[in-house]
Image (tube, rainbow, N blue to C red):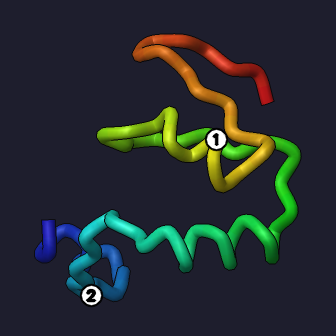
Amino acid sequence: MRAYLKDKGVRYEYLHTSGHVKLEDMKKLVDAMAPEMVVLIHSFHPDKFKDYFSNVRLLDDGEVVNL
């Protein structure tokens, strides 16, 4: 992949992200963006988020939501 990108003139950088966020940081993001709906992508306890966000939309696996 690196060779392909280099051949195409695409800069490659490796960045590690965990994908995990602290509740405090999530609150800041939601407050700053003021979304109509917050959809969780992955959580062990999604039902708990309704205690912190009034606009959480909980989806079942495979459920489709129109944006």
| x 12%, y 75%: residue | 3
| x 50%, y 68%: residue | 23
Rounded to the nearest whole Å, what is the CA distance between mark 1 and mark 2? 37 Å
Which of the 4 image quarters holds residue 22? bottom left
Earlier-in-chain disc, 1 versus 2: 2
Tag 2 secondary structure: loop
The relative height of residue 16 versus residue 19 in the rendered view (above or below) is: below
* Residue type, mark 2 in image: Glu
* Residue type, mark 1 in image: Lys
Q: Nearer the viewer, residue 48 or 4?
A: 48
Tell us which disc is closer to us: 1 or 2.
1
The relative height of residue 28 versus residue 26 in the rendered view (above or below) is: below
| x 83%, y 54%: residue | 35
Mark 2 lies on residue: 13
Q: Position of residue 1 (x, y in %)?
A: 14, 65
Mark 1 lies on residue: 50
Q: Position of residue 36 (x, y in %)?
A: 87, 45
Which of the 4 image quarters holds residue 33? bottom right
| x 62%, y 40%: residue | 39
Q: Nearer the viewer, residue 21 or 47?
A: 47
